[in-house]
Amino acid sequence: MKTKIKLIWAPYRRHTRSSVRLRVPERPGVYKLARLRQDGKLVVFYVGQAKGLRGRLLEHLSRSEPNRCIRGWIATGRTYFSYAEVPRQRDRDGAERYLYISYRPACNDPRRIPAGPDIDANPR
């Protein structure tokens, strides 16, 4: 049986240092990075989790970001983020897995589906 959790997403914001510092708490949660297509739609290109959301989202903006795909999209200046606070590690693991399976993001390694419980996020 799937665990059911509700993710309360912050609105998408431009992925800039000032926006992250101003808008993101240093709390645990999951997040999505998205790029803006030419037609104006956002497409999720990376999902992750962190014990400290603000710090992790700032790491993605640093020159030392190891993921070349993320660095490439961030260099365009057309990237956005959204996050949901998730206090419990087990729930974060399941939520990250759910997001990975739901979005199949281009910058996550397709051979590494995150471990975690089978959850249903935001069930109706």
Image: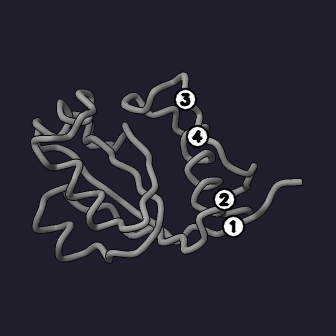
Sort mark 4 into few (<14), some (14-19) or many (20+) by Cα contacts within 10 Å. some
Q: Give the spatial CA distance, label 2 vs label 4.
A: 15 Å
Cα distance between the residues tagged 3 and 4: 6 Å
- Is label 1 in contact with label 2 (beta carbons under 8 Å)? yes
User: Counting other residues with Cα less than 10 Å from the Cα at mark 1, is it few (<14), some (14-19), or many (20 or more)?
Assistant: some
> Residue at 42% across / 56% down in the picture?
31
Image: 84 above or below 56: below
Pinpoint residue 107: horizontal percent, then vertical percent.
36, 31
Q: Nearer the viewer, residue 15 or 50?
A: 50
Q: Which residue is mark 4?
A: 114
Quadrant holding the N terminus: bottom right
Secondary structure state at the residue bearing disc 2: strand
Farthest right residue? 1
Residue under label 1, please give it.
Answer: 5
Q: Which type of secondary structure does the marked residue at label 3 adopt?
A: loop
Q: Nearer the viewer, residue 113 or 12?
A: 113
Report the amino acid beneath label 3: Arg
**Residue displayed at 37% across by 60% down:** 82
Q: CA distance from mark 3 to mark 2?
A: 20 Å
